[in-house]
């Protein structure tokens, strides 16, 4: 009887060992499976990005603060950084003033390839008292009810979480720079067709968005890092897609005596331009118009402003143009504004307008403009309530290359539209 009990105990012990080993093996297999399925640019939950990562780099207010290639350390961080709420595929626009609020930035890599950036903020919104922390990534947006676990993780590693990260302030005197992304043509897979109700140009707005979402911020950062006086490049690239929307090839010229490293980095970023199952078409980029028919320009009143259409199963390749531009803010000093008009040259529409201030972006390769906004009048304010304008200045869009190409369809990509500016205009300080 005792022997039977001993055998039963030994069997139970062996089974428990086998069960634990099976669980550990399944965890390792799960990690391996995740690694096999990694597609650059495809949206992932933050914990999946952490599971993919084999190294981590952290910046805080003092600059580079912590690096590790220990999987045990990364797992501990993943446990500390569990989100209470997460939205994958969140379209975020990181402005410089927005980046100034980052407490910590965490870069995740797999075999030297960037997987994701994580930005940790303290939530200072008066209307949102439930969540202490906000986390942005290249793939989405999340919130944490408590930041204690993240702060404790870094405290134990002598990493300060006070202040704003210094990663983004390395070149504070840069002019306002911008990367404009355009898709000019695309090729469909054999036997695939666009719907008769979907104009090719409208479909291309969805392709533009599919490149913007994973690539725009990376391109912005790279541009700002390499920019110097005299920069005059643009990029034309053909992106080819394989199974599951994965980018299989980026064809572009990277030979340049001065900017070869920059062009190679841009090429590597375009491998993140994953093609989703559906793309989101968008005929209005800047939300300057309320989406009510009576307020829209005539060419948009009978059009579908936003939509979704299948893309991954039909698109074989696309041609992308990257315009590297500088933003200008100028105002007219003097009475000459009453005599001369701001004038757009090289576009089918004749556009001339008296403006007191102008905001425009100029392509550094061609000298042409991508965007122009006119401001008429001066905002008047009540001395007792200076933040609340009594009479706001009138501001309106005069030209947008995106709108001209994809909505009006009266401008080709290689047309250069220039701006004639009256002598009274000077750059705003």
Image: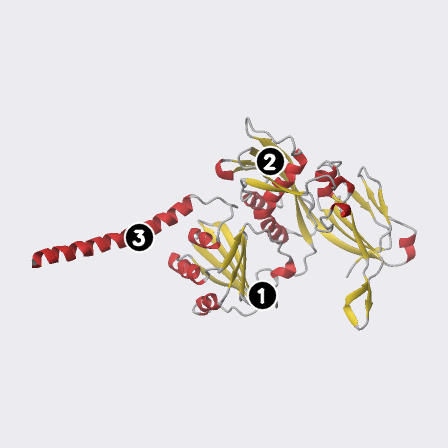
Evaluate if marks 1 and 2 touch, with contact meaning CB atoms under 8 Å apart. no
Asked whether, in this view, residue 28 is left or right of residue 322, the answer is: left
Residue 128's label in the rendered image is: 1
Q: Which quarter of the figure has residue 346?
A: top right
**Callout 2 secondary element:** strand
Residue at (44, 63) in percent of width and height? 80
Q: Describe the element under mark 3 as helix, strand or loop.
A: helix
Give above or below for 22 relative to 366: below
Whole-number angstrom distance, CA of label 3 to CA of label 2? 44 Å
Disc number lying in front (3 or 1): 1
Question: Which residue is nearer to you in this view: 1 or 141?
Answer: 1
Q: What residue is pinned by disc 3?
A: 23
Residue ID for mark 2: 318
Answer yes or no: is residue 214 visible: yes
User: Upstream in the sequence, badge 3 or badge 1?
Assistant: 3
**Residue 68 horizontal/vertical position (percent):** 43, 59
């Amino acid at each position: 009887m005792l022997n039977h009990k001993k055998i039963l105990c030994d069997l139970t012990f062996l089974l428990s060992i086998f069960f634990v080993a099976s669980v550990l093996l399944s965890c390792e297999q799960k990690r391996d499976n995740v690694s096999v399925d990694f597609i650059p640019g495809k949206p992932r939950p933050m914990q999946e990005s952490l599971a993919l990562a084999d190294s981590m780099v952290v910046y805080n207010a003092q600059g580079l603060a912590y690096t590790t290639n220990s999987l045990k350390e990364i797992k501990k961080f993943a446990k500390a950084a569990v989100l209470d709420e997460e939205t994958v595929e969140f379209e975020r626009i990181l402005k410089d003033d927005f980046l100034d609020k980052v407490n910590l930035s965490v870069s995740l890599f797999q075999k030297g390839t960037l997987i994701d950036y994580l930005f940790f903020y303290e939530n200072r919104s008066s209307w949102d008292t439930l969540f202490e922390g906000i986390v942005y990534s290249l793939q989405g947006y999340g919130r944490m009810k408590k930041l204690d676990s993240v702060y404790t993780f870094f405290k134990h590693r002598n990493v300060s979480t006070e202040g704003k990260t210094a990663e983004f302030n390395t070149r504070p005197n840069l002019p306002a720079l911008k990367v404009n992304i355009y898709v000019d043509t695309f090729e469909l897979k054999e036997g695939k067709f666009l719907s008769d109700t979907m104009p090719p140009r409208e479909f291309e707005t969805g392709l533009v968005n599919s490149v913007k979402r994973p690539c725009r911020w990376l391109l912005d950062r790279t541009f700002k890092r390499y920019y110097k006086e005299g920069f005059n490049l643009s990029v034309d690239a053909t992106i080819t897609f394989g199974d599951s929307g994965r980018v299989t090839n980026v064809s572009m010229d990277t030979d340049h005596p001065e900017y070869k490293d920059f062009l190679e980095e841009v090429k590597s970023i375009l491998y993140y331009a994953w093609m989703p199952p559906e793309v989101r078409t968008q005929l209005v980029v800047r939300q300057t118009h309320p989406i009510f028919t009576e307020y829209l320009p005539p060419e948009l009143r009978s059009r579908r402003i936003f939509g979704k259409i299948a893309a991954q199963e039909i698109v074989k390749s696309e041609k992308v143009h990257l315009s590297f531009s500088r933003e200008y803010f100028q105002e007219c000093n003097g009475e000459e504004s009453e005599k001369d008009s701001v004038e757009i040259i090289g576009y089918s529409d004749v556009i001339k307008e008296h403006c007191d201030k102008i905001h425009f972006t100029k392509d550094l390769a061609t000298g042409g403009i991508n965007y122009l906004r006119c401001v008429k009048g001066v905002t008047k304010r009540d001395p007792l309530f200076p933040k609340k304008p009594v009479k706001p200045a009138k501001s309106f869009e005069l030209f947008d290359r995106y709108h001209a190409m994809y909505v009006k369809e009266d401008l080709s990509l290689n047309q250069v539209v220039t701006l004639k500016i009256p002598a009274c205009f000077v750059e705003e300080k």
